[in-house]
Image (cartoon, grey):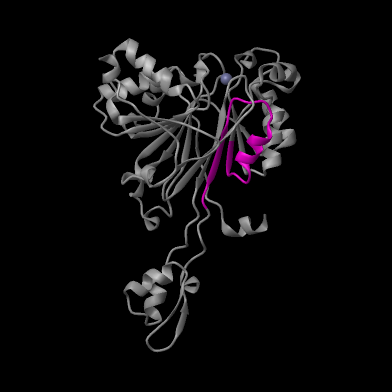
Amino acid sequence: MIDRAIDFLISTVKIDNQVINRQDRYSESSKVINSVVEITFLGTSSGVPTRSRNVSSVALRLPQRAEVWLFDCGEGTQHQILSSELKMSQIRRIFITHMHGDHIFGLMGLLASCGLAGNAQPVDIYGPMGLSEYLHACCKYSYIHLANRVQVREVKPGLVYEDQEFTVNCLPLKHRVPAFGYRISEKDRPGRFMVDKAIALGIPPGPIYGKLKQGETVTLPDGRRIRGTDLCEEPEVGRKVAYCTDTVYCDAAVELATDADVLIHEATFAHQDAQLAFDRLHSTSTMAAQVALAAGVEQLIMTHFSPRYAPGNSLQLNDLLEEAKAIFPNTKLAYDFLTYEVPRRRLERVCKL
Ligand code: ZN
């Protein structure tokens, strides 16, 4: 009976039209040209929370579609959300990197609260093998019924999600248990169609505008040939964010982060503690910076710090920052509630790459 009440829809990730639902089609490209993609760090400590840092969780806010996507959900994540400007009701997708407790112990509480709040929005959860079994067990023994609003999809390397604006890919990282890093890519889109210019050229409005918007060349009834590209602004380059934790330095992290606007990478240890990093398959600040450098990212934000570098200790987080900056200058340290708006690139700069 309890099993019947636990009504998850579990499916191996398969990208086809089924995962592109109506809600995902909500945005037309013209509405999101100036949309914001914003990262909020909800937890930046590794292993255990400290007074100033909770355990892992990062939110990606997509305000134009009123959605929040979470990456990992350590214990207390819902409290962090309540203390932030994010809305629980907007959580639409949760991507889990691996099954260590500091990345998943907040998941069940958060899902249960979403249910109690009468949150009608479905939540899709993506993560490694074992995640659905874990959630089933939590529901079973705590008598929680999440109904079919929650879908758990166990990921495999490659594409795990796609809609009209975004793709999410994952690759296995190098950790003590199976762990996946994620790459979130906004699709490029054509530049704004300059209606004024079309009207000035005497092009009659109608289906022809649709072709011109797509950059096609059309022939007008009077014989003139008009190139759509002449009537469109420069294409918008999609933003890319990579999230790599937990892992020691690995090529998969570089691949996920290639040409990303932001790389969020764990830096559990300082360089002098590299042996610990190798033993526990975590990264040092210098490894995070090396990934950023090799991948050619714009911005590195380090997170998942060992509590051993708290203020008052001989080695502190600013030391980790300096170590990383020596290799990759454009590095920041994450802290809880840090919000970072992912800037949209200008085409000129991309062309120079
Ligand atoms: Zn871990």
Q: Please tell me which residue is depicted at 56% across the width and 52% down the height of the picture.
A: 345
Quadrant in the rendering for residue 124: top left
Q: Identify whether 331 is placed above or below 82.
A: below
Provide residue 232's location: percent of width, then percent of height: 47, 68
Provide residue 301's location: percent of width, then percent of height: 59, 33
Which corner quadrant holds the N terminus? top left
Provide residue 320's location: percent of width, then percent of height: 68, 25
Left or right: 203, with 177 as reference point: left
Q: Identify whether 322 is placed above or below 112.
A: below
Provide residue 340's location: percent of width, then percent of height: 51, 37
Q: Give yes or no for residue 106 being in the magenta stretch.
A: no
Rendering quadrant holding ligand 1: top right
Q: Which residues are magenta?
A: 238-263
Which corner quadrant holds the C terminus? bottom right
Left or right: 233, with 205 as reference point: right
Q: Identify whether 173 is placed above or below 242.
A: above
Q: Please tell me which residue is depicted at 74% across the width and 20% down the height of the picture.
A: 274
Q: Is residue 230 visible?
A: yes
Q: Nearer the viewer, residue 94 or 323?
A: 94
Q: Is residue 322 visible?
A: no
Q: Give yes or no for residue 260 being in the magenta stretch.
A: yes
Quadrant in the rendering for residue 152: top left
Left or right: 132, with 352 as reference point: left
Left or right: 109, with 309 as reference point: left
